[in-house]
Image: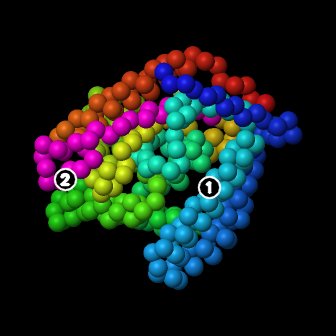
Amino acid sequence: MNQSENITTQTLPQLALPPFLRGSLAFLLMLLNTIFWCVPLYIIAFLKLLIPIPAWRNGCTQILVRIAQNWIDGNNRIFRLARHTEWIVEGVHDLQEDEWYLLAANHQSWLDIFVLQKVFNRRIPFLKFFLKQELIWFPFLGIAWWALDFPFMKRYSREFQEKHPELRGKDLETTRKMCARFQHYPVSIINFLEGTRFCAEKRDEQNVPFRHLLKPKAGGIATALAVMNERMRTLLNVTIVYPNGKASFWEFLCGQTPRIIVHVEKLTVPQRFLRGDYLNDANYREQFQTWVWKMWEQKDALLNSYITTYEQASPHQSS
Protein backbone atom coordinates (compact mmCIF):
# COMPACT_ATOMS: atom_id res chain seq x y z
CA MET A 1 0.00 0.00 0.00
CA ASN A 2 1.21 3.50 -0.76
CA GLN A 3 2.69 5.63 1.95
CA SER A 4 -0.14 7.48 3.67
CA GLU A 5 -0.55 10.64 5.63
CA ASN A 6 -3.04 11.03 8.44
CA ILE A 7 -4.55 14.49 8.72
CA THR A 8 -6.71 15.03 11.77
CA THR A 9 -8.65 18.23 12.26
CA GLN A 10 -9.39 19.05 15.88
CA THR A 11 -12.39 20.90 17.22
CA LEU A 12 -11.68 24.20 18.89
CA PRO A 13 -13.19 24.10 22.41
CA GLN A 14 -15.23 27.28 21.91
CA LEU A 15 -16.89 25.76 18.82
CA ALA A 16 -18.32 22.71 20.61
CA LEU A 17 -21.76 23.46 19.17
CA PRO A 18 -24.77 21.27 18.41
CA PRO A 19 -24.49 19.76 14.91
CA PHE A 20 -27.10 22.05 13.32
CA LEU A 21 -25.45 25.21 14.63
CA ARG A 22 -22.00 23.91 13.73
CA GLY A 23 -23.13 23.19 10.18
CA SER A 24 -24.95 26.52 9.86
CA LEU A 25 -21.87 28.44 11.02
CA ALA A 26 -19.61 26.56 8.60
CA PHE A 27 -22.05 27.15 5.73
CA LEU A 28 -22.27 30.88 6.51
CA LEU A 29 -18.48 31.19 6.61
CA MET A 30 -18.23 29.35 3.29
CA LEU A 31 -20.79 31.70 1.77
CA LEU A 32 -18.84 34.75 2.96
CA ASN A 33 -15.60 33.21 1.68
CA THR A 34 -17.23 32.63 -1.71
CA ILE A 35 -18.58 36.18 -1.98
CA PHE A 36 -15.22 37.64 -0.94
CA TRP A 37 -13.26 35.82 -3.66
CA CYS A 38 -15.97 36.22 -6.32
CA VAL A 39 -15.43 40.00 -6.37
CA PRO A 40 -11.85 39.93 -7.77
CA LEU A 41 -12.69 36.86 -9.84
CA TYR A 42 -15.56 38.64 -11.61
CA ILE A 43 -13.34 41.65 -12.34
CA ILE A 44 -10.63 39.50 -13.95
CA ALA A 45 -13.28 37.47 -15.78
CA PHE A 46 -14.70 40.68 -17.29
CA LEU A 47 -11.23 41.77 -18.42
CA LYS A 48 -10.67 38.31 -19.90
CA LEU A 49 -13.91 38.59 -21.88
CA LEU A 50 -13.21 42.18 -22.93
CA ILE A 51 -9.93 41.56 -24.76
CA PRO A 52 -10.06 38.57 -27.17
CA ILE A 53 -6.30 38.05 -27.41
CA PRO A 54 -5.21 34.45 -26.63
CA ALA A 55 -2.09 35.44 -24.66
CA TRP A 56 -4.11 37.94 -22.61
CA ARG A 57 -6.85 35.43 -21.91
CA ASN A 58 -4.34 32.76 -20.90
CA GLY A 59 -2.76 35.25 -18.47
CA CYS A 60 -6.16 36.12 -17.03
CA THR A 61 -6.92 32.43 -16.64
CA GLN A 62 -3.79 31.93 -14.53
CA ILE A 63 -4.83 34.81 -12.25
CA LEU A 64 -8.32 33.34 -11.98
CA VAL A 65 -6.82 29.98 -11.00
CA ARG A 66 -4.83 31.61 -8.16
CA ILE A 67 -8.01 33.28 -6.91
CA ALA A 68 -9.85 29.94 -7.01
CA GLN A 69 -7.01 28.23 -5.12
CA ASN A 70 -7.27 30.90 -2.42
CA TRP A 71 -11.01 30.23 -2.23
CA ILE A 72 -10.29 26.52 -1.68
CA ASP A 73 -7.70 27.38 0.99
CA GLY A 74 -10.38 29.41 2.78
CA ASN A 75 -12.87 26.54 2.61
CA ASN A 76 -10.28 24.14 4.00
CA ARG A 77 -9.69 26.42 6.99
CA ILE A 78 -13.43 26.53 7.60
CA PHE A 79 -13.59 22.73 7.48
CA ARG A 80 -11.05 22.62 10.31
CA LEU A 81 -13.55 24.46 12.50
CA ALA A 82 -16.28 21.89 11.98
CA ARG A 83 -15.15 19.09 14.31
CA HIS A 84 -12.68 16.26 14.79
CA THR A 85 -12.40 14.54 11.40
CA GLU A 86 -9.78 11.97 10.51
CA TRP A 87 -8.41 12.18 6.96
CA ILE A 88 -6.44 9.22 5.65
CA VAL A 89 -4.79 10.21 2.37
CA GLU A 90 -2.62 7.78 0.41
CA GLY A 91 -0.55 8.13 -2.74
CA VAL A 92 -0.13 11.91 -3.12
CA HIS A 93 3.62 12.23 -2.51
CA ASP A 94 4.88 12.17 -6.08
CA LEU A 95 2.66 14.75 -7.79
CA GLN A 96 3.62 17.95 -9.63
CA GLU A 97 1.87 21.26 -10.35
CA ASP A 98 3.40 21.50 -13.83
CA GLU A 99 2.05 18.25 -15.30
CA TRP A 100 -1.23 17.25 -16.92
CA TYR A 101 -3.41 14.79 -14.99
CA LEU A 102 -6.63 12.94 -15.70
CA LEU A 103 -8.47 11.91 -12.53
CA ALA A 104 -10.90 8.99 -12.51
CA ALA A 105 -12.91 8.94 -9.29
CA ASN A 106 -15.95 7.22 -7.85
CA HIS A 107 -18.86 9.50 -7.02
CA GLN A 108 -21.17 9.33 -4.00
CA SER A 109 -22.17 12.87 -3.05
CA TRP A 110 -21.48 16.58 -3.58
CA LEU A 111 -18.99 16.23 -0.74
CA ASP A 112 -16.68 14.40 -3.17
CA ILE A 113 -15.87 17.70 -4.93
CA PHE A 114 -14.73 19.39 -1.72
CA VAL A 115 -12.78 16.29 -0.68
CA LEU A 116 -10.88 16.29 -3.99
CA GLN A 117 -10.22 20.03 -3.75
CA LYS A 118 -8.86 19.66 -0.22
CA VAL A 119 -6.56 16.77 -1.12
CA PHE A 120 -5.21 18.07 -4.44
CA ASN A 121 -5.22 21.88 -4.11
CA ARG A 122 -1.69 23.19 -4.89
CA ARG A 123 -0.42 19.62 -5.30
CA ILE A 124 -1.42 19.35 -8.95
CA PRO A 125 -2.80 21.83 -11.50
CA PHE A 126 -6.17 23.34 -10.62
CA LEU A 127 -8.95 20.76 -10.80
CA LYS A 128 -11.60 21.09 -13.48
CA PHE A 129 -14.60 18.88 -13.96
CA PHE A 130 -17.45 18.51 -16.42
CA LEU A 131 -20.66 20.26 -15.44
CA LYS A 132 -24.25 20.06 -16.57
CA GLN A 133 -25.08 23.05 -18.73
CA GLU A 134 -27.81 24.14 -16.30
CA LEU A 135 -25.22 24.75 -13.56
CA ILE A 136 -23.95 27.88 -15.30
CA TRP A 137 -26.87 29.61 -13.53
CA PHE A 138 -25.75 28.38 -10.10
CA PRO A 139 -25.49 31.42 -7.76
CA PHE A 140 -21.98 32.93 -7.61
CA LEU A 141 -20.19 29.78 -8.77
CA GLY A 142 -21.78 29.40 -12.22
CA ILE A 143 -20.01 32.45 -13.65
CA ALA A 144 -16.83 31.49 -11.80
CA TRP A 145 -16.85 28.03 -13.38
CA TRP A 146 -17.36 29.58 -16.82
CA ALA A 147 -14.50 32.07 -16.28
CA LEU A 148 -12.22 29.22 -15.17
CA ASP A 149 -12.93 27.31 -18.41
CA PHE A 150 -14.84 24.49 -16.78
CA PRO A 151 -16.43 22.40 -19.54
CA PHE A 152 -20.23 22.62 -19.59
CA MET A 153 -22.06 19.74 -21.23
CA LYS A 154 -25.63 19.25 -22.32
CA ARG A 155 -26.74 15.83 -21.21
CA TYR A 156 -29.33 13.83 -23.15
CA SER A 157 -31.31 10.95 -21.69
CA ARG A 158 -31.22 7.57 -23.41
CA GLU A 159 -34.88 7.96 -24.35
CA PHE A 160 -34.23 11.37 -25.93
CA GLN A 161 -31.28 10.02 -27.90
CA GLU A 162 -33.41 7.16 -29.21
CA LYS A 163 -35.86 9.72 -30.57
CA HIS A 164 -33.02 11.89 -31.92
CA PRO A 165 -30.26 9.50 -33.09
CA GLU A 166 -28.37 12.41 -34.68
CA LEU A 167 -27.39 13.48 -31.14
CA ARG A 168 -25.55 10.23 -30.37
CA GLY A 169 -21.93 11.02 -29.57
CA LYS A 170 -22.72 14.72 -29.14
CA ASP A 171 -21.40 14.68 -25.56
CA LEU A 172 -18.09 13.18 -26.71
CA GLU A 173 -17.77 15.84 -29.41
CA THR A 174 -18.35 18.50 -26.74
CA THR A 175 -15.65 16.84 -24.63
CA ARG A 176 -13.29 17.00 -27.60
CA LYS A 177 -13.85 20.73 -28.14
CA MET A 178 -13.55 21.63 -24.46
CA CYS A 179 -10.38 19.60 -23.87
CA ALA A 180 -8.64 21.12 -26.90
CA ARG A 181 -8.17 24.40 -25.01
CA PHE A 182 -6.35 22.59 -22.18
CA GLN A 183 -3.31 21.83 -24.33
CA HIS A 184 -1.80 25.26 -23.67
CA TYR A 185 -1.22 25.02 -19.91
CA PRO A 186 -1.10 22.18 -17.34
CA VAL A 187 -4.51 21.16 -16.09
CA SER A 188 -6.15 18.40 -14.08
CA ILE A 189 -9.46 17.06 -15.37
CA ILE A 190 -11.77 15.14 -13.05
CA ASN A 191 -14.04 12.56 -14.60
CA PHE A 192 -16.63 10.74 -12.53
CA LEU A 193 -16.86 7.73 -14.81
CA GLU A 194 -20.16 6.54 -13.35
CA GLY A 195 -21.84 9.68 -14.67
CA THR A 196 -24.02 10.04 -11.59
CA ARG A 197 -23.89 9.61 -7.83
CA PHE A 198 -23.85 6.04 -6.55
CA CYS A 199 -26.81 4.52 -4.79
CA ALA A 200 -27.82 0.90 -4.31
CA GLU A 201 -30.99 1.31 -6.38
CA LYS A 202 -29.04 2.52 -9.43
CA ARG A 203 -26.51 -0.28 -8.99
CA ASP A 204 -29.24 -2.92 -8.89
CA GLU A 205 -30.96 -1.39 -11.90
CA GLN A 206 -27.71 -1.61 -13.88
CA ASN A 207 -27.16 -5.22 -12.74
CA VAL A 208 -23.39 -4.72 -12.46
CA PRO A 209 -21.03 -7.08 -10.55
CA PHE A 210 -19.96 -4.32 -8.13
CA ARG A 211 -20.92 -3.71 -4.53
CA HIS A 212 -19.97 -0.06 -4.22
CA LEU A 213 -19.82 1.27 -7.80
CA LEU A 214 -21.94 1.84 -10.88
CA LYS A 215 -20.98 0.94 -14.43
CA PRO A 216 -18.06 3.10 -15.66
CA LYS A 217 -18.43 5.10 -18.87
CA ALA A 218 -15.11 5.12 -20.69
CA GLY A 219 -15.89 7.42 -23.62
CA GLY A 220 -15.20 10.70 -21.84
CA ILE A 221 -11.67 9.90 -20.68
CA ALA A 222 -10.82 8.17 -23.97
CA THR A 223 -11.78 11.31 -25.87
CA ALA A 224 -9.90 13.57 -23.45
CA LEU A 225 -6.72 11.52 -23.85
CA ALA A 226 -6.98 11.57 -27.64
CA VAL A 227 -7.53 15.35 -27.82
CA MET A 228 -4.61 16.18 -25.53
CA ASN A 229 -2.06 14.94 -28.10
CA GLU A 230 -0.14 12.80 -25.59
CA ARG A 231 0.32 15.65 -23.09
CA MET A 232 -1.88 13.86 -20.60
CA ARG A 233 0.02 10.64 -19.91
CA THR A 234 -0.84 10.16 -16.24
CA LEU A 235 -4.13 8.95 -14.83
CA LEU A 236 -4.82 9.31 -11.12
CA ASN A 237 -7.16 6.54 -10.07
CA VAL A 238 -8.85 8.14 -7.04
CA THR A 239 -10.95 6.15 -4.61
CA ILE A 240 -13.02 8.12 -2.08
CA VAL A 241 -14.23 6.16 0.93
CA TYR A 242 -16.62 7.14 3.70
CA PRO A 243 -16.18 4.00 5.81
CA ASN A 244 -18.72 5.04 8.44
CA GLY A 245 -21.50 5.28 5.87
CA LYS A 246 -22.49 7.44 2.92
CA ALA A 247 -21.80 11.08 3.73
CA SER A 248 -23.56 14.23 2.58
CA PHE A 249 -21.98 17.67 2.44
CA TRP A 250 -24.36 18.93 5.12
CA GLU A 251 -23.50 16.05 7.45
CA PHE A 252 -19.84 16.85 6.93
CA LEU A 253 -20.35 20.51 7.87
CA CYS A 254 -22.32 19.40 10.93
CA GLY A 255 -19.39 17.26 12.06
CA GLN A 256 -21.07 13.92 11.42
CA THR A 257 -18.45 12.46 9.06
CA PRO A 258 -15.80 11.10 11.41
CA ARG A 259 -13.47 9.58 8.82
CA ILE A 260 -12.65 10.19 5.14
CA ILE A 261 -10.20 8.06 3.15
CA VAL A 262 -8.73 9.07 -0.20
CA HIS A 263 -6.57 6.52 -2.00
CA VAL A 264 -4.65 7.74 -5.06
CA GLU A 265 -3.05 5.35 -7.54
CA LYS A 266 -0.78 7.00 -10.11
CA LEU A 267 -1.01 5.15 -13.43
CA THR A 268 0.85 5.66 -16.69
CA VAL A 269 -1.68 5.53 -19.50
CA PRO A 270 -0.71 2.77 -21.97
CA GLN A 271 0.72 4.25 -25.16
CA ARG A 272 -1.92 2.59 -27.32
CA PHE A 273 -4.66 4.56 -25.52
CA LEU A 274 -3.13 8.02 -25.97
CA ARG A 275 -4.41 8.28 -29.52
CA GLY A 276 -7.51 6.59 -30.84
CA ASP A 277 -11.02 7.03 -32.19
CA TYR A 278 -13.34 5.80 -29.46
CA LEU A 279 -16.50 6.40 -31.48
CA ASN A 280 -15.48 4.78 -34.75
CA ASP A 281 -12.77 2.22 -33.92
CA ALA A 282 -14.52 -0.81 -32.41
CA ASN A 283 -11.27 -2.61 -31.53
CA TYR A 284 -9.85 0.45 -29.74
CA ARG A 285 -13.15 0.97 -27.92
CA GLU A 286 -13.26 -2.63 -26.72
CA GLN A 287 -9.66 -2.56 -25.46
CA PHE A 288 -10.18 0.76 -23.68
CA GLN A 289 -13.40 -0.41 -22.03
CA THR A 290 -11.63 -3.57 -20.85
CA TRP A 291 -8.83 -1.49 -19.30
CA VAL A 292 -11.32 0.76 -17.50
CA TRP A 293 -13.44 -2.19 -16.38
CA LYS A 294 -10.44 -3.91 -14.75
CA MET A 295 -9.58 -0.65 -12.99
CA TRP A 296 -13.15 -0.49 -11.71
CA GLU A 297 -13.05 -4.07 -10.46
CA GLN A 298 -9.93 -3.25 -8.45
CA LYS A 299 -11.52 -0.05 -7.15
CA ASP A 300 -14.60 -1.94 -5.95
CA ALA A 301 -12.40 -4.48 -4.15
CA LEU A 302 -10.44 -1.63 -2.53
CA LEU A 303 -13.64 0.09 -1.40
CA ASN A 304 -14.91 -3.14 0.09
CA SER A 305 -11.60 -3.71 1.88
CA TYR A 306 -11.62 -0.27 3.49
CA ILE A 307 -15.28 -0.48 4.49
CA THR A 308 -14.83 -3.94 5.98
CA THR A 309 -11.76 -2.79 7.91
CA TYR A 310 -13.34 0.31 9.40
CA GLU A 311 -16.99 -0.61 9.80
CA GLN A 312 -16.28 -2.06 13.25
CA ALA A 313 -14.28 0.99 14.33
CA SER A 314 -16.05 3.28 16.74
CA PRO A 315 -16.77 6.76 15.37
CA HIS A 316 -15.13 9.70 17.10
CA GLN A 317 -17.09 10.91 20.02
CA SER A 318 -18.79 14.20 19.60
CA SER A 319 -17.11 17.06 21.43
- Disc 2 marks which amino acid? Asp
Q: Is residue 78 above or below residue 36?
A: above
Q: 264 or 169, which lies in front?
A: 264
Q: Is residue 145 visible?
A: yes
Q: Is residue 58 above or below residue 244?
A: below
Location of mark 1 (residue): 69
**Percent coordinates x, y for residue 151 in the rendering:** 41, 62
What residue is shown at x 57% (from left), y 61% (from top)?
A: 65
Location of mark 2 (residue): 277
What residue is shown at x 39% (from left), y 41% (from top)?
A: 235
Left or right: where 106 falls relative to 61? left
**Percent coordinates x, y for residue 237 in the rendering:** 41, 37
Q: 35 or 66, which lies in front?
A: 66
Provide the residue span drawn in magenta. 257-285
The verdict on residue 281 being magenta is: yes
Which quarter shows the C terminus? top right
Left or right: where 129 falls relative to 76? left
Mark 1 is surrounded, within 10 Å at the Cα level, by few (under 14), some (14 to 19) or many (20 or more) other residues, namely some
